[in-house]
Image (tube, rainbow, N blue to C red):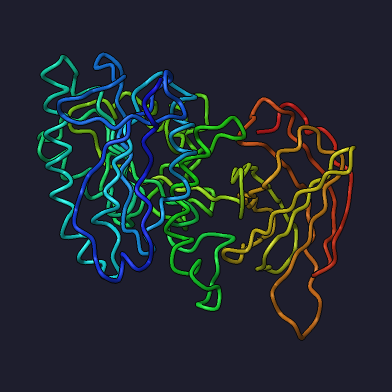
Amino acid sequence: TDEACSSFTRLSFHSAVVGTELNVKLLLYTRKNLTCAQTVNSTAFGNLNVTKKTTFIVHGFRLTGSPPVWIGDLVDGLLFVEDMNVVVVDWNRGATTVIYTHAASKTKKVAVVLKEFIDQMLAKGASLDNIYMIGVSLGAHISGFVGEMYDGQLGRITALGYREPLGNIDFYPNGGSDQPGCPKTIFGGFQYFKCDHQRSVYLYLSSLTEDCTITAYPCDSYRDYRSGKCVSCLTPQKESCPLLGYYADHWKDYLKEKDPPMTKAFFDTAEEKPFCMYHYFVDILTWNKNIRRGDITIKLRDKAGNTTESKINHEPATFQKYHQVSLLARFNQDLDKVAAISLMFSTGSVVGPKYKLRILRMKLRSLAHPERPQLCRYDLVLTENVETVFQPILCPKLQM
């Protein structure tokens, strides 16, 4: 208790310009020292208990030399969900440079330092199954190098910051590229360059809180997911859907197999914390004589006046006579009891006549809570670009 707390290396942009020599510092946090890091190395383990899980957090490229703003929250979140050792791998002296390739060239050297430390842990009784690495950006590559040094026998690696499928399961938020709430042009300043990339960290962080649980859907493509073709994991006959983040490894026994198949999983998020989206199917049966193509906007309201909206506009839906169309709607609020629903149909045409969509039956069903009663409405006529508000009724129980 008399020792001073260790802290993450703080450098300046000047250091990035002149360059820094690599120096790796390992900062240990446990439930015994939640807020006061201990510097550990191959000969001094501090509070590290080799019988518990050890999670290494490995940051990436640091243009400005400042500590990553998310480090503290990630340490706190991990120790909140499990009694473990958390080791922050501080290689800021090496990662801080204006030339990305200079930082990249030092990643294998960092991996060697980590292997030396893990070797000593193993010598003291630790198990490779209990080693977990969370790597961000270049830190993900470092984690991969360490995994390679142990022939793929580490317990788990989570890599935040890469597009191509690499893992047993790869998660693609909002398709995996542009993220909602991030600047779309360079006029957004420095955030334009890092916001989308860094969102993976904040989505992972959300899995460590009780605010919401993000469900992902195994699927071949983002388009198929948005079209509602990839929700079979929610049916009672199937395994449950994978969860994003810390609890991703709980999904299905085959992730624990020696050579599990690679799986892509897609999901959408809100623009800001807590990021969760809640999925519903909107089943629409129409009786128009002619085919109608267009988008649907649906709003839900509860008795307290809370409202949430979903625009189903990723591609025009095709409505044919007596043919049911099932649309996947995504809301950023989960209203327990829906008192009112509004629908709006749009063809996207600015000029020309206003079309009508004649609905025999509309049905709303929650994917996250299939036990909730399904809501229906019959004989609706939607005039294009006009919001139609109505009170739903309970669907007959025999309906599928």
Quadrant of the image occupied by residue 17: bottom left
Q: Position of residue 37 (x, y in %)?
A: 38, 31
* Image point (33%, 48%), residue name: 59
**115 shown above or below 111:** above
- 224 left or right of 57 in image: right
**Residue extending farthest bottom:** 351
- Which quarter of the rendered picture does the N terminus lie within? top left
* Residue 350 drawn at (x, y percent): 74, 82
Q: Residue at x 33, y 29 (%)?
A: 38
Up/down of 52 relative to 274, above or below: above
Residue 94, image quadrant: bottom left
119 displayed left or right of 4: left
At horizontal 38% and vertical 52% (from top left) the residue drawn is 10
Q: Position of residue 13 (x, y in %)?
A: 37, 66
Where's the C terminus, which quadrant?
top right
| 63 is higher (above) or lower (below) than 46 | below
Q: Is residue 173 left or right of residue 314?
A: left
Q: Is residue 3 left or right of residue 223?
A: left
Q: Please tell me which residue lies in front, 47 or 180.
A: 47
- Residue 252: x percent and y percent? 36, 26
In the image, 154 versus 263, the foreground residue is: 154
Along the viewing direction, whichever of 70 and 39 lies nearer the viewer:
39
At 46% from the left edge and 60% from the top edge, which residue is drawn? Answer: 196
Indicate the quadrant where residue 317 lies.
Answer: bottom right
Q: How many labels sit on residues?
A: 0
